[in-house]
Amino acid sequence: MVSDEPKRVAFIAHCLLNQNAKVEGGAKRPGMWEPVIDLLRERGYVIRQMPCPELAFGGARRFWGVREQFDTPLYRRHCRRLAKLVAAVIAQHAAAGDDLVLIGVDSSPTMGIDFTPSAPHWAGKPDIIEDDSALVRGDGIFIEELKAELAERGLPEPRSTGIRHWFADYDPEEELRRLGALLK
Amino acid sequence: MNDPRARRVAVVADSLLETTLDELGRNGFGIIQLPPAGLDRETTGAWLEQTAEHVAEFRRNDYEVVLVDDGLLTEGLNAALDVLGVPPLPQYAIQPPSTSKLMPDT
């Protein structure tokens, strides 16, 4: 029997459930990022995986990139096309009174929530030896488009945070505390 | 750079995600979740279209891709794959629960 009780629903970045969508060299696990998936299941959240805009646009063999490289009108249109699909599902849950959260990836130019990588000087031959990009405050391109789509539809923005497993000072305990506070 | 991805992807029906997640995880699969029920036809079709784009890219790069299916969206998914020249995905055989508990102790 399907319950009419409000549900807890987590909209998550694609790669948290599918590490194969990461750029080559970017996966941390064989299949999924269990620390988040396990916590969501423990807390009784319904998982809603979002599409991976970078995989569909740049392919599985794309190079690593920063926000300035992705921030083109065409990529934004691609992100908006996918954001419309996610917004349609968010609308369904919002109408049911469900509790919604959004979990992105804070090292991503596309899925960043609180941080996104920036390097205005990155261009041309892809032979950067040392990663000299900076993590700056702000949303990734897809997250910006999703928020714009939600605003156009009059839908609320879910509470949100980003996974930081690629930060140099990554602290798993801090992340679990932050996620725990988000999930209530 | 060390990258432990298993290059195995399972396209999973929304209704089967929770019950198959542990097994798929143990076997190293990453997951592409199919859209939930209750969306309008146009949105569901567009969702399957973008799913097929993900699948086509994985197949083009020789990732293993399988389907864990409840049959509700098979036709639409196959049509979207066909547009991209991708044949229907092989079905993943869900492992039956262990019968060891039914065996007498020896």
Image (spheres, grey):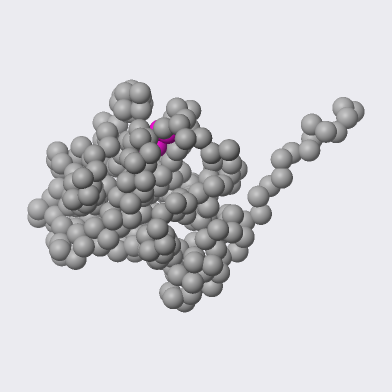
Front-most of residues B19 and A37: B19
Quarter holding the C terminus of chain A is: top left
| Residue ID at (49%, 72%) | B79
Any part of residue A70 in sight? yes
Depth order, front residue of B68/A68: B68
User: Where is residue B81 drawn, in percent x and y?
Assistant: 47, 70
Please state the extent of the stretch shown in magenta in the rendering: A7-11
Residue B1 is at least partly visible in this image:
no
Residue A57 sits in quarter: bottom left
* Up-down relation of residue A169 to residue A119 (above or below): above
Query: Per the image, is B53 magenta?
Result: no
* Residue sticking out furthest to the left: A121
Residue A110 appears at what percent x and percent y? 24, 51
Q: Which of A177 and B67 is in front in this view?
A: B67
Percent of width and height locating residue B30: 48, 50
Viewer-closest of A79 and B15: B15
Image quarter for residue A74? Answer: bottom left
Question: Left of A173 or right of it: where is A122?
Answer: left
Magenta-colored segment: predominant secondary structure: strand
Residue A83 is left or right of residue B73, and the answer is: left
Q: Could you say where residue A86 lies in the image, as x and y percent from the top left? A: 33, 51
